Amino acid sequence: MRIRLLVLVFLFGLSAKAQERIVFESGKEGHAIYRIPAIISLPNNDLLAFAEGRVNGTDDFGDINLVMKRSTDDGKSWSEIQTLIDYDSLQAGNPAPVVDLHNPDFPDGVIYLFYNTGNNHEYEVRTGNGVREIWMIKSFDMGETWGAPVNITSQTHRPNQPEFNSEYNFEEDWRHYANTPGHAFQFQKGKFKGRIYIPANHSKGEINAKGEDYFAHGYYTDDHGETFHLSESVDIPGSNESIAAELPDSRMIMSIRNQKGDIRQRIIAYSEDGGVSWSEEYFDNSLVDPVCQGSILSFENEGGKTILAHSNNDHPSLRNNLTLKFSYDLGRTWKNPRVVDFNHSLQGGSWTAYSDLVYLGENKLGILYEKNDYQQIVFRAIQF
């Protein structure tokens, strides 16, 4: 019996390893390290994987490019790297891709990629010494080519620079700013069908070592990127990196990192009006989190019932134990945990970190995630 068990464990390990594909790897294809993964599926079932390509090292600020790869076989193989945005010696980061499937002028779909640029380190921007901007590019041929970048900062930010705001209020105006990380999404049904929603976060007020100056929010467009509007902020100090998903009846759910770290759990927020305001905000004790990013995704089963999938590091202190959980009651409870990746010997540092989810159809999800102390971004398909 013991021999049989060992054989099963060995075979399971081989199977899991065989399913894993390295998409971006440190020190290769022109960049010292890759971080902040995001992934989407296209109408033709191609997958596009995005990341920050950090030229010189791990620092969140500096020479950072936005890069992309494509898979035409459900993630089994990936194309050569393509650099989409090179902001010279400064950063272009936090890619948030989404496919617009409801533009009547482009019935085959339009890909949007929202991203941020910055001219100083995060802490300096938090103190008012620098600015973070919000940009958008579009592709009308499924990511083969991309249009010119469009700066949408004046519509989606409350920044401290005179060119945007001549009456700067340190307490109320925003300073640091970041999309998601992960994918944006589009409402597919209901009153807000066609709305493109990008979760984000900002800092404002007095700088706080515990991260209390961070607040999650979102921005959205109802006219295919012509104009944008801001949501209300989530009313929990320290609410930071956020990602969201559509619910039935024009509702929405957002999963948020708690930057304060006083409660090692994800923050959940619900909206009844398509992400404009928040009807409920709370810490979810079933989503343990070590102060890291997570991903959430909604999809429908064969019977049309909405299912939510959530990925994050299910550990109170380590970036380890990347786990997938499912909700069959619109996020009220989370069941059927599936460990995606875990290092039993890890005592510190990071084994798995940021992740993003994509639905592959036929009860299969794809997950793109950081692994091995940020040395790789890998893809894995998971049947459920």
Image (spheres, rainbow, N blue to C red):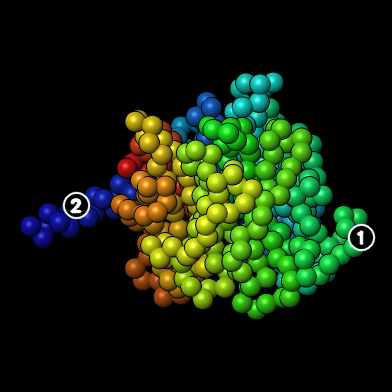
- The residue that label 1 is drawn on is 166
Could you give the CA–CA distance between mark 1 and mark 2, rounded to whole angstroms? Answer: 66 Å
Picture coordinates of residue 187, whole percent (x, y) = 56, 36
Location of residue 133 (image quadrant): bottom right
Dot in front, 1 or 2: 1
Mark with earlier residue (1, 2):
2
Q: What SS does tag 2 mark?
A: helix
Q: Residues within 10 Å of mark 1 (few under 14, many from 20)?
A: few
Q: Nearer the viewer, residue 295 or 276?
A: 276
Asked if the residue under mark 2 is in contact with the one under mark 1, i.e. CB atoms within 8 Å, the reply is: no
Location of residue 145 (image quadrant): top right
Q: Nearer the viewer, residue 256 or 248?
A: 248
The reply to whether residue 79 is visible in this rendering is no
Residue extending farthest bottom: 209
Identified by mark 2, the residue type is Leu
Quadrant where the N terminus lies?
A: bottom left
Instruction: Identify which residue is drawn at 46% across, 32% down.
Output: 73
Instruction: Identify which residue is drawn at 59% across, 44% down.
Output: 273
Determine whether 240 is above or below 208 in the image: above
Q: Is residue 105 left or right of residue 15?
A: right
Q: What SS does tag 1 mark?
A: loop
Q: Which mark is residue 121?
A: none
Q: Nearer the viewer, residue 369 or 153?
A: 153
Picture coordinates of residue 87, whole percent (x, y) = 78, 51
- The residue that label 2 is drawn on is 8
Identified by mark 1, the residue type is Ser
Instruction: Identify which residue is drawn at 67% across, 51% down.
Output: 231
Instruction: Identify which residue is drawn at 91% across, 55% down.
Output: 163
The reply to whether residue 367 is visible in this rendering is yes
